[in-house]
Image (cartoon, helix red, strand yellow):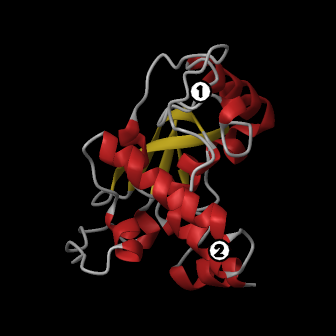
Amino acid sequence: MLDFLPMDLSPGWDIPKFTRGEILRQPQVPKMLHLVNPRTVLGATWWNKTRQVAYATNNYCCWACGVHKSRSYRRRLEAHESYTIDYREGLAELREVQALCSLCHGFIHMGRTNALWSKREISTRLYLDTVVHGYWILAQAGLKPWPHTREIFEPDYTPEPEPAIAPWGKWRMKIGDKLYQSPFKSFAEWERHFTR
């Protein structure tokens, strides 16, 4: 099903300095903080410089699976922001910007990938390759996906109890030394924005 092996070490391809399969277990940024991100807050110049550094950090290989950008599904890497999230306090803090292949990135954002597939904006082949690739990388690391992904693909999975979560208006995003709040005052406002 996959067009490549996740760790293609053919002669001539750069070898990754590291692989971190656990990256695929990153928690989702809560809805309260959608549209609050370093690309928007710090601007295009910062974003472009930071993502170029992330790409070069691992010899232009995906940080999660190790595939070189030239052997990846879309022949490029994508930048992904990683956060530490405190659900009880309502705080997400930018940890680092990572370089991922499109399959690993799509797996982290499986809710979005699932929605794109449901609307027929991506092929069934790409959808299934993303799922198989993500599960394979996590299995190699001895890990399971986050509950939001397991609920989609594992019919016998029993969800864990929801963690205590801060009220909508308390949520902040910390980028550097600054705190940024949600552009949405409520779930209803968020829903209106994303369903228009």
Q: How crowded is mark 1: few (under 14 residues within 10 Å), some or many (20 or more)?
A: many
**Amino acid type, callout 2:** Trp
Residue 83 sits in quarter: top left
The residue at the point 33 percent across, 74 percent down is 154
Toward the viewer: 106 or 8? 8
In the displayed structure, does residue 135 sit left or right of residue 98?
left
Q: In this view, does 87 lie to the left or right of 15?
A: left
Q: x, y (%) of residue 143?
A: 27, 48
Task: Provide the secondary structure element on which disc 1 rests.
Answer: loop
Q: Mark 1 points at which residue?
A: 61
* Residue 13 percent across, percent down from the top left: 64, 18
Q: Which amino acid does label 1 sit on?
A: Cys
Near-viewer residue (161 or 32): 161
Label 2 Cα crowd, 10 Å radius (few <14 / some 14-19 / many 20+): some
Q: Nearer the viewer, residue 39 or 82?
A: 82
The quadrant of the picture occupied by the C terminus is bottom right
Q: Which residue matches tag 2?
A: 117
